[in-house]
Image (spheres, rainbow, N blue to C red):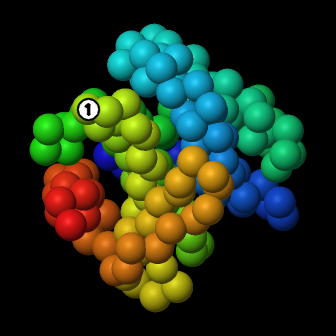
Amino acid sequence: MSASASTPQLSGNQHRWHYEFAHLALRIPVFGQADFMLDALADPLRSRALIRAGMARVAQNCGLSEDQVETLAKQIRVLPARFDADSGFVVGMPPPQNAPECYLFAIVRDKSGSIAYYTLERSLGDDTVLGGWNAEGAHLNFGPGPQPDLDAFVAAIVALRRK
């Protein structure tokens, strides 16, 4: 799920875009407006618009130019996914440069309508961390994560949800 477009040159605070997009820009509205966000992610055109809107908010905080936003937004991919009996989406990010930037993150809705938000983050070493966020805004750490691969990430979430 990595990108084919080249990564623009970033300096100073601009490097925070990666963290802010995965950990804040989509997470906050997902928990606040779950139905709207999940419906938008399900539609390819609306999901692109949602990514652009999230990137526009990140751009303000991180000082990104319109060209940088456009290049970076094109590298973010949204895929529908099944998590056992539950459904959701996996969002693929450009390769992270620093911990705790995300390789992937997932938004999962269970049959009761509850939302879960999982992250596969780069650790301080060469490993990954399976993390997440709850609706109250607390960051969760589930321990070592799988390789940064879509199928391995989904399998790790399924295993975690079965516990």
Q: Which residue is drawn at 31% across and 64% down?
A: 148
Given residues 59 and 107, the one toward you in this image is 107
Q: Residue at x 44, y 66 (%)?
A: 131
**Along the horizontal axis of the image, is 9 left or right of 39?**
right
Name the spot of residue 96 as percent of width and height, x first: 51, 63
**Disc 1 residue crowd, few under 14, some 14–19, many 20+, Cα 10 Å:** few
94 up-or-down from 71: above or below: below
Name the spot of residue 81 as percent of width and height, x first: 23, 36
Q: How many marks?
A: 1
- Res 131 visible: yes
Given residues 64 and 32, the one toward you in this image is 32
Q: Residue at x 52, y 46 (%)?
A: 6
**Along the horizontal axis of the image, is 112 left or right of 39?**
left
What residue is shown with label 1?
A: 111
Given residues 113 and 42, the one toward you in this image is 113
- Res 70 visible: no
**Along the horizontal axis of the image, is 89 left or right of 105?**
left
60 up-or-down from 143: above or below: above
Q: Residue furthest front?
A: 112
**Along the horizontal axis of the image, is 80 left or right of 131?**
left
